Image: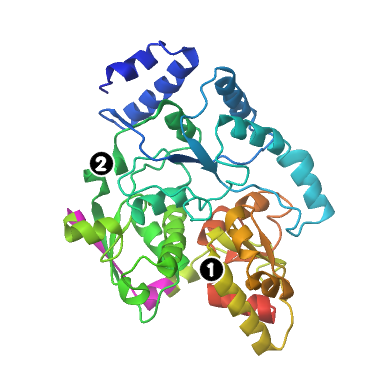
Amino acid sequence: MILTSEQQAILNGEKGETLAKVMKTLVMYGDAFEAEKLVPITSKYNHLVTSFGLKVMSPVYDLMQTLLDAGVASGQKFSVDPRPLDKNVPANFLQNFVFNKFMYTKQSFYEDQLEKLGLMDKNAFSCTCYMDEVGNQPKKGDVLSWAESSAVVYANSVLGARCNRNSGIIDIMGSIVGYVPYFGLLTDEGRKATWIIRVKTTKKPEAQLLGSAIGMKVMEDVPYIYGLTEHIGNELNDAAKAYLKDFGAATASNGAVGLYHIDGLTPEAVELGEALIAEGAKEYIIDDAELERVQANYPVIWKNPDAKPKLCFIGCPHLSLEQLKTWTDNIEAALKENGTAKVQIPTVLTAAPGVLEVFNKTEYAERLKATGVITSYICPLMYMNNPLCKKMPVITSSNKLRTYTSARYYTDAQILEAITKGGK
């Protein structure tokens, strides 16, 4: 790897031993991927994936304290993934005991470290940091040092920024020195599609299901997708961005996709079109039958597959303001149709604190509360990490949550029927 004189000076320890170790870590990371150089981070803010104060993560706290003691806090302010706990989310005595005495015992301590390192504000906890209400939205072409997979794929694809799927801790190290290794999705060649996806469904495909199908097929490769604009339009409005948020999260978790191109919609596809498709790209056709096959093959890992659901999570990744409003309308309408006043399964809709703050000022908030639905800022994955929670029969419309936990996936329509009518 070729370093500039400034980068070499940091590596040589001219700005202190701690900063030299941070630089060495990034150089070793780049060497592992045959990066030719380091390039400057150009985004205004960073985003960190590690948000939770698990008791076992003492090496992380020690590392953070070393950085703080050396005075090498992040050169950027940053947002961070969602908090793991919220007293408003249903949990029994034993579950809460495990949460507070054995799992997230260092949460307050860690959040204090994050604030000192450069947290944007005390409520900048969300996997959808790019929402207007959160304020961390990079520009097209910006070079990032993010790690959260659903945020990385959104930034690359929908915003046209440039970021690799970094690991936790690497994200903050890049931010501290202001550089990241130049390889993969930072390069023009690495952003070319090696898969052509043709969507041939008779109706708008479920975002989380379509993303799952593509992610499991292409894995870490870049897909170029035809036929989706027929269903979601060719304008990046609120509805399209919410769809692509959920779609991308499924490609990133069910596979390892860090970038996708939607023909006629996403920035680079609009600008460069088929020039983004690499020679010899493979092809995958998705029709109604293929999506049915994908969903039917999801494993059911509940102890009792026929158990009645005890909890429902909607919003992984976090919901947008418009999605909260749409769910409110749909839940009200379904309850009225089914002749019931409140949801039949405890249901939690999750969104960023800033989004919830705006939502709570609208008339939708009281309407949703009247249905019995709870809103929260937590990460459902962190809730399901509790061994007593993962034994519960939990349902979700998130393919990411399904992939990483014991929660069972259903489409939005199936979830709506379950929570308003009862059963599964």
Query: Looking at the picture, which amino acid does disc 2 mark?
Result: Thr
Query: Looking at the picture, which amino acid does disc 1 mark?
Result: Gln
Q: Up-down: is 87 above or below 100?
A: below
Secondary structure of the magenta portion, mostly? Answer: strand
Quarter of image, res 326:
bottom right
Identify the colour scheme used.
rainbow
The residue segment tinted magenta is: 276-291
Q: Up-down: is 9 above or below 252?
A: above
Q: Residue at x 25, y 59 (%)?
A: 269
Quarter of image, res 6:
top left
Label 1 crowd bin: few (<14), some (14–19), many (20+), radius 10 Å: some
Q: Which residue is mark 1?
A: 323
Q: Which residue is mark 2?
A: 187
Q: Say which element carries label 2.
A: loop
Residue closest to the far right = 93
Label 2 crowd bin: few (<14), some (14–19), many (20+), radius 10 Å: few
